[in-house]
Amino acid sequence: MTALPPQPLSPLDGRYRSAVLGLGDHLSEAGLNRARVQVEVEWLLYLTSHRMFGSSPLTDEQARQLRSLADDFGQAEIDRLAELEATTKHDVKAVEYLVRERLHALGLDRIAELTHFAATSEDINNLSYALTVNAAVAQVWLPAFRAVIAELRAQAVQYRDDAMLARTHGQPATPTTMGKELAVFVHRLERLRAQIEKTEYLGKFSGATGTFAAHLVADPEADWPRVSREFVESLGLGWNPLTTQIESHDWQAELYSRISHANRVLHNLCTDVWTYISLGYFRQTPEPGATGSSTMPHKVNPIRFENAEANLELSSAVLDSLASTLVTSRLQRDLTDSTTQRNIGVGLGHSLLALDNIQRGLAQVSLDREALAADLDLNWEVLAEAIQTVIRAEVTAGRSTISDPYALLKELTRGKRVDHEALTAFVDGLDIGQAAKNRLLALTPAAYTGLASELVDRL
């Protein structure tokens, strides 16, 4: 068998690449290295702008040219870092050397020793991950998440008055509306969106064991915690003042747990929509030229929601693993996080792919109101709850002498189909007040939806 040309191992970088491309700009190795270059450059500019160790501020043009190493980071820089790392066998050291090369090209060798000054690799890495994850979530994942919520919200409003049979435990139950059921998901997802948007992206910059030891020896008079805080916050991050060599990753665990929670709510949405499709409540619009089944031409399979289910499960598996492992580091440092954090993009990628499928799937379904109405008309027994509740109220008010309303309705309806005529005859014979009887006689399964429509306004 002939060997294939080099192939992507992950479907995220192969079959589904176009759906997750935006994440690669931030959570790839190149995206991480670009952020590392940014942090190294900004630290050097901070030191010089504060005239530390006898340095002087760079001119605006020098600062612009130095920052362009990150701003214009591209294939040339990617290739050069690969060459440097082949020698250094250390990814962050390679970044330091790349920055030094730019300083030399700009005639700034006099400040070269301020590159990576008093910094451990984790000072650079933790800030770089915070920057890249923040950008990936804010610029790529959250917009896709919001788009799904917006589509659900629109459909909740559109179908707010469309009564349908509920199916608690999979059995016919008190009717609701399709809009209200979709609104429940909107409400759940909006809460999670707000929590994810409030994520605190933290960073540290305090040396090899978080003590500022090298910093203090280099300049005993400097207020190094203040310097650290100013620098971290200048990058748009929150400052973590108490760490070991690493930033403790608690903010990452919180973020990934919340996104995983959102995945599971979306998974619940997918299984419900899939079930509504199988019941005929939703009809799918076939895509022109698409094949539903290789052997059954009539089929329009709910593949968008099935694909989303699988990707949400994969995403949560990765994100849950990250959340549980990143919060532990042996003593002051071990390298387990170096490996796990390189899979952040995998976890978010499967979630993003699922969001893409859900968005497409929701756009391809429409409500079959006739199917909803027919199902309701076959299940008049769901009014048993209303009847026994009204009888209880009548007994309490002294307008009925019925001894056990629940048992009475249980005998009539449990495990049975009761049609309109039989239920009407039953209500006519009840020992209750006429006003209550008239309300029950006017009731239909389609009208027995309580405040379902109004509850959509809670959004």
Image (tube, helix red, strand yellow):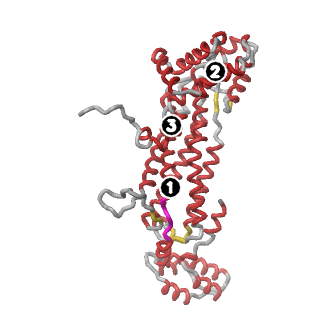
Q: Position of residue 180 (x, y in %)?
A: 58, 64
Q: Nearer the viewer, mark 3 or mark 2?
A: 2
| C-alpha distance separating marks 3 and 1 | 23 Å
Looking at the image, the residue that sits furthest to the left is 1
Locate residue 138: give its quadrant.
top right
Label 2 and label 1: CA atoms lie apart by 49 Å
Q: Amino acid at mark 1?
A: Asn
Which numbered tag is attached to residue 268?
1
Say which quadrant the N terminus sits in. Answer: top left
> Compared to 322, does 117 lie above or below?
above
Spot occupied by residue 331 in the image (x, y as percentages of width and height) = 55, 24
Residue identifier under label 3: 345
Q: Mark 1 and mark 2 in contact (Cβ < 8 Å)?
A: no
Q: Residue at x 65, y 37 (%)?
A: 200
Q: Is residue 291 magenta?
A: no
Residues drawn in magenta: 364-368
Label 1 Cα crowd, 10 Å radius (few <14 / some 14-19 / many 20+): some
Q: Position of residue 321 (x, y in %)?
A: 49, 38
Give me the disc on residue 66. Answer: 2
Rendered position, 441 above or below 232 = below
Residue at 62% x, 83% y is: 439
Q: Nearer the viewer, residue 15 or 325?
A: 15
> Dominant secondary structure of the magenta stretch?
strand
Q: CA distance from mark 3 to mark 2?
A: 28 Å
Residue nearer the viewer, 102 or 118: 102
Q: Quadrant of the C terminus?
A: bottom right
Name the amino acid, label 3.
Gly
Which of label 2 and label 1 is nearer to you? 2
Q: Residue at x 60, y 37 (%)?
A: 135
- The correct choice, above or below, for 314 with respect to 44 in the image is below
